[in-house]
Image (cartoon, helix red, strand yellow):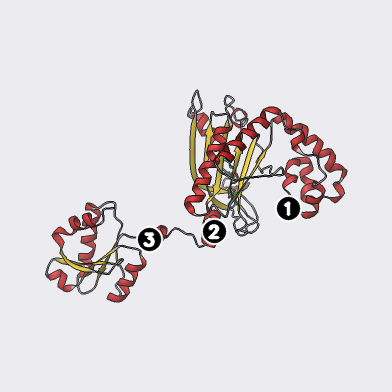
Amino acid sequence: MYTFNDRNDESLTLRPEGTAGCVRAGEEHGLFFNQQQRLWYMGPMFRYERPQKGRYRQFHQIGVEAFGMQGPDIDAELILMTARLWKQLGLDDNVKLQLNSLGSASARSNYKSALVVYLRSVEQGLDDDSRRRLNSNPLRILDSKNPDTQKLLDGAPVFADFIDLESQEHFEKLQSILRGAGVEYQLNPRLVRGLDYYGKTVFEWVTSDLGAQGTVCAGGRYDGLVEQLGGKATPAVGFAMGVERLILMLKTLGLEPQELKKVADIYIVAAGDGTDKIALFIAENLRNELPRQRIQVNCGNGSFKSQLKRADKSGAKYAIIIGESEIQSHSVMLKSLRDNGEQQLISQNILSEYLQDLMQP
Ligand code: HAM
């Protein structure tokens, strides 16, 4: 937790994630009463972790939470939605889906007891972190990255022997939907997730392109949380993706969408005495008339050539060029920055109308 004392010596904790807040907001506004909800959020989250590549103390999540649906169909829908997003971003070959079921609370508790008995018998061989978790959160030891601990875990009891029938059926149905939809997955019995509200389905989308911080999106079912936070029992499932990790991945793979690099649709070049003022007036007029187009005016002078270079770099489709002779003739030179670089003298009176036709998708 990112916790600190403020000037009044009050202890503040910055939100580490969005799920619990989403549940509280839903409760406060009566969103769960007799209705289903599919909600989403995006925003900064804070965790006091040791920073490294892909792991920050302030990062951003896009999260989705679905309430009031208990079947595996909604688990599948969320997974299919993320699979669709990877495809759209061109990342589908680079992320792999890992799946597990944590079963019901009582199955988990029986398993936890058996696991603790086993781990106590090999406690000498555990690393410090795992020894500490033996008392606080023994299931987390299952996803220890320490190779010696992992070796010891090979002899540990397996959850498949403890899972309850209902969770087992839920999990099998989910897998059958995913197989039917052509979504590949790997069963990972050691996937337990760091947050303790999960039960039944848990999943992670993992990549090998980011080094140690390979999880780009993760989530699962948390049917007990609404009740635990004071509401009526409400089934729920969701996930969150780490925006920085996604961007890092797109950059590593050279897949940043070109569209994002584009900052303008029309760039106004002004070269010569008094042209900067006219450029700003024309820009304001175009912003009124063509509100969907992004208009950028060259500010800070520069030679004609360097302004055109900036115009090109902005990603704009057209440059509007205003020189002294254009001011004289109340016109502008409209230059295509893509295609063939054609240019044309257009009267200022009809400029917005002319551009409107040109810029139609
Ligand atoms: P989480 O696994 O803690 O789950 O975080 C989700 C994602 O946020 C991670 O997979 C990762 O991409 C990103 N992330 C987490 N910590 C950091 C960090 N320090 N720096 C950069 N990125 C990070 C949750 O937060 C759950 N609330 C997800 C969920 C929603 N489960 C059900 N509904």
Label annotation for residue 248: 2
Q: Of the residues shown, which amino acid type is indicated by label 1?
A: Lys
Left or right: residue 264 compared with residue 3: left
Who's the residue at 53% across and 31% down the image? 67
Residue 244, position as x, y percentages in the image: 53, 54
**In this rendering, would 134 be left or right of 35?**
right
Specify which label sits upstream in the sequence, 3 or 2: 2
Q: In the picture shown, does residue 195 fall above or below 303?
A: above
Tag 2's secondary structure?
Answer: helix
Count residues near mark 2 (Cα–Cα under 10 Å), then give few for <14, some for 14-19, many for 20+.
Answer: some
Residue on which the image places disc 1: 145
Marks 3 and 2 sit apart, C-alpha to C-alpha, by: 19 Å
Q: Is residue 290 above or below residue 174?
A: below
> Is 63 on the left or on the right of 101, as rendered?
left
Residue on which the image places disc 3:
262
Q: Position of residue 127 (x, y in %)?
A: 80, 52
Mark 1 or 2, nearer chain start: 1
Circle 3 sits in a helix, a strand or a loop, which is it? loop
Q: CA distance from mark 3 to mark 1?
A: 41 Å
Rendered residue at 40%/58% (across/down): 259
